[in-house]
Image (cartoon, grey):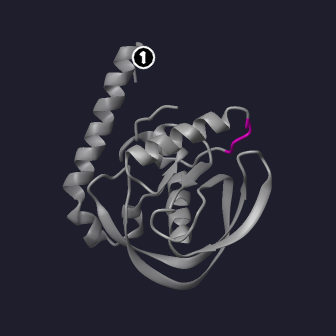
Amino acid sequence: MAVLDVVHYGDPILSRVCGPVVDFSNLHAIVNDMFDSMYEAEGIGLAANQVGFDMNLFIIDITHTEEIEETYIFVNSTIIDTNGSEELFQEGCLSLPGIALDVLRPEKVKLRYQTVDGQWCENEFDGLLARAIQHEMDHLNGLFIVDRVGEVERIKYQAELKALEKGSKDRIAAGSKKKGFVL
């Protein structure tokens, strides 16, 4: 198992819609690395594109925050429906370190997804788990929490966002030079 680098705002993989998982043969290893990476970064959820994989896959572990005893792995997910009252809740993001914003989200979500073994499921989730699912689904669709707030709130973090964007571009350029690629 390995801890993977979490990519930050400005990395192109975070701004596009992730493709479906079609090959499940290496998924267990990827998921294990994702859990290691999420725990190392002290997060409760992680989308595959946050660690550089272009695939519709995310994990969640809220066992330390609620009376839930299992971790979750969602593959090829689609939100079918949301319901319940919309609530403001402060969300942080591993790809936006140091930024936390109040985001309005429905309290319940109905999700269609596959398990790590390819079995299709459909379930309704609520509370923090529903919020985390919506947050990670946003990542898989190229959205950030800053896309869910008003312009005034976004302007408050303009300097931080530009710095993250520059850091991502610098990291990509340095990585491409090491590998001999030109962007």
Give the mark count.
1
- At x 40% / y 79%, what residue is drawn? 88
Looking at the picture, which amino acid does disc 1 mark? Phe
Quarter-of-image position of residue 11: top left
Q: Left or right: 136 with respect to 73?
A: left
Residue 106 screen position, x and y as percent = 53, 78
- Residue 7 vs 26, above or below: the answer is below
Q: Indicate left or right for 161 with 109 as reference.
A: left
Residue 14 horizontal/vertical position (percent): 46, 46
42 lies above or below 32: below
Q: Is residue 27 above or below residue 106?
A: above
Verify whether residue 97 appears in magenta: no
Report the residue at 38% width, 21% height from top. 176
Foreground residue, 128 or 142?
Answer: 128
Q: Residue furthest bottom?
A: 85
**Location of residue 99 in the rendering, given as x and y in whole percent from the top left corner:** 28, 59
- Locate residue 66 relative to residue 160 in the image: left or right: right
Residue 21 lies in the magenta stretch: yes
Secondary structure mostly seen in the magenta stretch: loop
Would you place residue 124 above or below residue 37 in this image?
below
Q: Is residue 174 visible?
A: yes
20 and 51: which is toward the camera: 51
* Furthest residue in direction right, as rendered: 119
Q: Quadrant of the C terminus?
A: top left
Q: What residue appears at the point 73 percent right and 37 percent down from the top-left corner?
A: 24
Q: Secondary structure at mark 1?
A: loop
Residue 13 is at least partly visible in this image: no
Q: In this picture, which residue range is highlighted in magenta? A: 20-24
Q: Which residue is mark 1?
A: 181
Residue density around tag 1, few if under 14, some if 14–19, many if 20 or more, within 10 Å: few
Measuring from the top left, give residue 85's x and y in whole percent: 53, 87
